[in-house]
Amino acid sequence: MRAYVVREHVVRDHGTTRSAKWEETADPSPPAEGVVVRVHAAALAWSDILQMEGTYAGEVPDSPFVSGHEFAGEVVAAGEGTTYAPGDRVFGFLSSPAAFAEYVAAPARCVRRTPDELTDTDAAVFTTSFLTADVALVTLGGLTPQRSLLVHAGAGGVGRSALQLARSYGSELVLATAGSPARRAAAQAAGAVATAGYDDFPDLVRESTGGRGVDIVLESVGGEVFDRSARVLAPMGRLVTIGASSGRPPQRLKLPLLWQRSISVCGVHIGRLLAEAPEVLEPSWERLLDLLSAGRIESEAGLTVPPSGLARGIEALRSRSVDGRVVIDFTRGVAV
Ligand SMILES: NC(=O)c1ccc[n+]([C@@H]2O[C@H](COP(=O)([O-])OP(=O)(O)OC[C@H]3O[C@@H](n4cnc5c(N)ncnc54)[C@H](OP(=O)(O)O)[C@@H]3O)[C@@H](O)[C@H]2O)c1
């Protein structure tokens, strides 16, 4: 007899998100050092859409595959050697996609206990948004209250989290970009003191820093935005690149610029770090969970849809109309 009936979002062919369907599949069993989680919420990221379409600049899984990386829910089975038990609330990130399913099997190192402060919906979006932002700003960027910061795409998921963190860490000068006046207002509400568009941010940086340049840039848009960002850095400034939402990788950066202007460029991929060097992330987890329990940061979904509304979530991200992240609410049931 089957323990569960599992429905999951299967991508049969890359090329269009419409080729993916909810299908019934076999029960997962817990890996020896892992858990099976009944998924209550899963986060939809821009990179999930690109993986479905086969155009993601990082790893694209062979089809068929189940989409989704980030989830939150309740442990229903735990392998020996784990510290988890059925009923534990957990949230997690899978380095290979499989999270858009009613149940997922995950290695124990990929999940953490959900803090009481977080609902499942909010926990589902926490890792990608806040962990990425903290590692980028603090571990790589060397953020201190005195070092000025420019956050690109400040109304997006990672952008809003980065702005909240900068405010919590006492940053004195935080600038942001966004794609429209409404999005710039959202970035300002999240913690930016001044905002600009993707074309005119060099003017904002010049005016705000007295021509010196900005100390840290969190860059996620790519293309010309990346190229221009390298040129607004102050001496010893750091550009941390995490993605290319525009779909265009940086085109013009020539390495001699780094020594000519005494600047650094570095990058991070949170999924790879979670899989390959999770110990690097522990200081970030500690800081973030402290901020969370002190009520100084808020993880929140911008839009929640039922599994049947996944196409609506995809469209909302594509049209850049969501402030923050999109979450799929599995408690509302999956119809195959
Ligand atoms: N390296 C890592 O570990 C890591 C982790 C998380 C995310 N990421 C990457 O970081 C980026 C941001 O992630 P996110 O979850 O914050 O995504 P998101 O919520 O979808 O935000 C991305 C934002 O980028 C802006 N944008 C600017 N130019 C765009 C374009 N041509 N097309 C689409 N959007 C554009 C949009 O805001 P406006 O409309 O205001 O311009 C959009 O809301 C993505 O590229 C993602 O893949 C990387």
Image: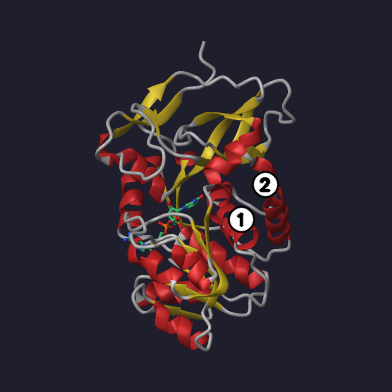
Crowdedness of circle 1 by 10 Å Cα count: few (<14), some, many (20+)?
A: many
Q: Kindly tell me whether mark 1's CB lies below 8 Å from ligand 1.
A: yes
Three-letter code, disc 2: Val
Q: Which mark is residue 108?
A: none
Q: Secondary structure at mark 1?
A: helix
Q: Which residue is mark 1?
A: 135
* Point 58% across, 43% down: residue: 273
Q: In the rendered view, tell whether residue 315 sits above or below residue 216.
A: above
Quadrant (top left/top right/bottom left/bottom right) for the C terminus: top left
Crowdedness of circle 2 by 10 Å Cα count: few (<14), some, many (20+)?
A: few
Q: Nearer the viewer, residue 241 or 288?
A: 241
* Point 47% across, 81% down: residue: 205
Model colouring? secondary structure
Image region (quadrant) for ligand 1: bottom left
Q: Are marks 2 and 1 in contact (CB under 8 Å)?
A: yes
Q: Earlier in the sequence, mark 2 or mark 1?
A: 1
Q: Nearer the viewer, residue 296 or 248?
A: 248
Q: Which residue is mark 2?
A: 280
* Point 41% across, 44% down: residue: 306
Q: In the rendered view, tell whether residue 134 sits above or below residue 121.
A: below
x%, y% of residue 36? Answer: 59, 27
